[in-house]
Image (spheres, rainbow, N blue to C red):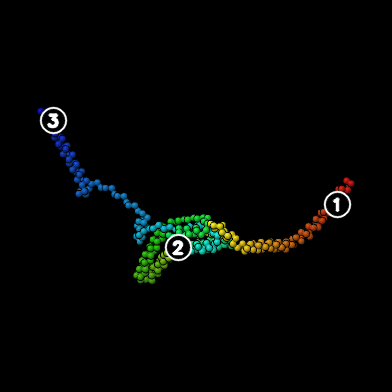
Amino acid sequence: MKWLRAVAFLAVVAVVFLLFVGCGLRTQTEESSPDKGGGITSAPASPPEITLEQSVRFADNSFASAEQKLIRTAEIALDVENIDDALAKIRLAATMADGYAAELSISGADGERFAWLTLRVPVAKLDRVLTEIELVGKRTNLRMGDQDVTLQYVDLEARIRNAERQEGRLLEILARAETVEDILRVEQELARVRGQLETMTAEFRYLSDQVDFSTISVSLKETPTASPTITGSGLRGVWQRGLAGLIDSVNAMLVGLGNGLVFLFTAAPYLLLLAGVGVPTAFAARRFWVKKLRKTDAPNS
């Protein structure tokens, strides 16, 4: 009978234990149910990646995009057979690309001239113009560079728009001003804002021009050997160049003779003084040494 009581007791304990476990599972299920407003919440999603375009839009809602802005420049050096012909072809290439020649400088004599030319061409046509320029002569140097001014461009544009909005608010305040003191104070602030706006607008226009138009610096050296084929350009103007060389030599000789005569006239007083003092001194010294030599030779004889 004891073993029956023991089995009954264990059965009761097992039933109680199962009841407690069931209640605990139900409570946990109810707490995690979304209908009760609780439960385990999911981890927040990672923030979306913010690009340069979005960051600019967040900083100033007046912008819709921030396209990359580059200032492109190029420097090219050429040996050409004839500078005049080369300059005409280079200018034509720039004009056909809707560009223009900004500066031009030529130095030297015929056959040994140098030229420096600055071109401004649309940035989209820079590579095409460089290719056409290389066909003009024999390229000796080429250098290209890109300067990223995107942040400067966007920042300047944002400041201009902020200044324009500030100008508009000041105009509204000026329209409602009643006293002379208020009017003068608003006009003073308005003049300051407009001054800053004009400065930034001029800077922005210059920067925009640098971005829209590339700068090409071209240096030319005139030399007959620049031709890719055998030509008689080396004999071109031989008589004129020979006559010019003869004239230069004669002129150089005359200049040297003239400088020598000028030196003689300039140094004449000093030369006369040296002659007046030096010649008698030289004769006296000669007479002294002759007498001394004679006295020395007399006892020996």
Question: Relative to 173, is 33 above or below?
Answer: above
Question: How far from the left and from the top, in percent, is residue 37?
Answer: 21, 49
Q: Nearer the viewer, mark 3 or mark 2?
A: 2
Q: Residue at x 10, y 28 (%)?
A: 1
Q: Going by the image, does 193 lie left or right of 88? A: left
**Residue flagged by tag 1: what amino acid is it?**
Lys
- Answer yes or no: do the residues labelled 3 and 1 have beta carbons within 8 Å? no
**Residue flagged by tag 3: what amino acid is it?**
Ala
* Camera-nearest residue between 80 and 184: 80
Q: Distance of mark 2 from mark 1, alpha carbons? A: 97 Å
Q: In the figure, residue 25 lies in which quadrant?
A: top left
**Residue position for label 3:** 6
Q: In the figure, residue 152 lies in which quadrant?
A: bottom left
**Residue position for label 1:** 291
**Residue position for label 2:** 97
Q: What element carries label 2?
A: loop
Q: Distance of mark 3 from mark 2, alpha carbons? A: 108 Å
Question: How far from the left and from the top, in percent, is residue 8?
Answer: 12, 32
**Residue flagged by tag 2: what amino acid is it?**
Ala
Q: Is mark 3 on a helix, strand or loop?
A: helix
Chain-order first, disc 3 or disc 2:
3
Question: How far from the left and from the top, in percent, is residue 66?
Answer: 38, 58
Q: How crowded is mark 2: few (under 14 residues within 10 Å), some or many (20 or more)?
A: some
Q: Going by the image, does 30 lie left or right of 296? A: left
Question: Relative to 7, is 172 above or below?
Answer: below
